[in-house]
């Protein structure tokens, strides 16, 4: 038997073969239990590339602030586990965690999650989320330069195996913006006023946070800190699994926390117009908002 040389996808057809290999097996699903949510649990569930990792870190450092914070983990999704991947990674999603309240990561809508918890969602402009997802896939799942932004569009619009695309996710959480169990924030506003976001998250989670605690969390959620300590924020557990199950090469340059001066592809006008059309078809009739900026203006009024 010959071993296959590790290789990233070089086309959409090859990418379509790679992604299903990351799904949990029937045996893994049978060996895992669904999350039994507690009223104190906090589920951080933005859409992909809309601030999830930063919010995981913010939450974890907040609950550990009284102990001087905590960076003693190899993967942020080990201490704030990712619900959808727990079975594939062999994690006990119902296990106790380093501190209370328990926290979890997800990319699901409200309907896809267990009821009875508390939910944190950061929203991001769909055009920014699209470009960020493209760069995230490039260098991990497909070889850089082999799939163009235009080709990637249907991948993003499809929404992955769950068929939950950006617009379905957005509408699900927008409908809950006034619910006591949901904290909805704008990703860009979190970045521009981190201290206020930390206070809001702490209050929502029932965590006491004085000025020294906020100082610590603000510093540890900064771009510079997370780049300096980038390994646990780059999905190491998922990367190892992707190498084992999908035959992807190690040493990926794809990272969640990217330098300010990292390459960011400009969104072609054709894709920009398409995303505007998707908004007009799916979001505007439900919310009355013609674009993302209008929606956020209401949220932050």
Image: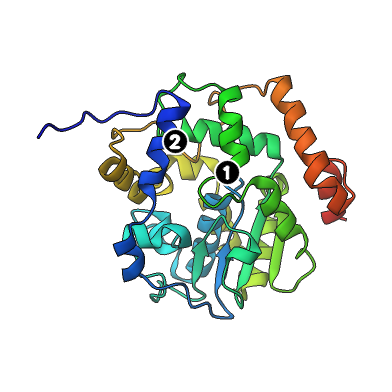
**Compared to 258, does 151 lie above or below?**
above
Helix, strand or loop under label 2: helix
Q: Residue 16 has which mark?
A: 2
For residue 53, above or below residue 38: above
Quadrant including the C terminus:
bottom right
Give x and y (percent) for residue 91.
34, 65
Answer with the quarter of the image where residue 130 lies. Answer: top right
Q: Where residue 11 sits: x, y (%)? A: 44, 24
Image location of residue 144, percent across then percent down? 44, 22
Q: In which quarter of the image is the N terminus?
A: top left
Question: Spatial distance from mark 1 to mark 2, Cα to Cα?
Answer: 20 Å
Name the residue rendered at 45%, 72% in the picture.
34
Left or right placement of residue 3 versus residue 254 in this view = left
Residue at image point 54% right, 80% down: 38
> Which of the 4 quarters of the picture holds residue 176?
bottom right
Q: Is mark 1 on a helix, strand or loop?
A: loop
Give the side of residue 153 with respect to residue 269, left or right: left
């Amino acid at each position: 038997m010959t071993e296959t040389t590790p290789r990233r996808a070089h086309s959409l057809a090859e990418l379509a073969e790679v992604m299903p290999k990351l799904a949990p097996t029937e045996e893994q699903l049978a060996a895992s239990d669904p999350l039994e949510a507690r009223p104190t649990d906090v589920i951080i569930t933005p859409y992909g590339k809309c601030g999830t990792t930063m919010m995981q870190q913010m939450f974890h450092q907040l609950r550990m602030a009284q102990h001087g914070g905590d960076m003693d983990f190899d993967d942020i999704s080990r201490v704030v586990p990712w619900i959808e991947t727990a079975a594939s990674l062999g994690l006990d999603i119902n296990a106790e965690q380093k501190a209370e309240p328990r926290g979890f990561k997800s990319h699901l809508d409200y309907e896809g999650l267990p009821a009875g918890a508390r939910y944190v969602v950061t929203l991001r402009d769909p055009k920014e989320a699209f470009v960020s997802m493209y760069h995230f896939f490039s260098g991990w799942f497909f070889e850089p330069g082999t799939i163009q932004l235009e080709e990637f569009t249907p991948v993003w619009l499809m929404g992955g195996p769950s068929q939950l695309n950006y617009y379905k996710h957005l509408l699900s959480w927008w409908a809950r913006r006034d619910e006591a169990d949901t904290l909805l924030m704008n990703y860009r506003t979190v970045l521009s006023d981190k201290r206020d976001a930390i206070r809001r998250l702490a209050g929502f989670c029932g965590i006491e946070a004085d000025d020294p605690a906020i100082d610590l969390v603000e510093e540890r959620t900064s771009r510079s800190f997370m780049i300096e300590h980038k390994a646990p924020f780059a999905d190491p557990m998922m990367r190892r699994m992707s190498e084992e199950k999908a035959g992807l090469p190690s040493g990926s340059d794809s990272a969640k926390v990217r330098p300010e001066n990292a390459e960011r592809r400009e969104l072609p006008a054709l894709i920009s117009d398409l995303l505007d059309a998707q908004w007009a078809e799916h979001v505007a009739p439900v919310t009355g908002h013609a674009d993302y900026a209008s929606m956020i203006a209401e949220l932050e009024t």
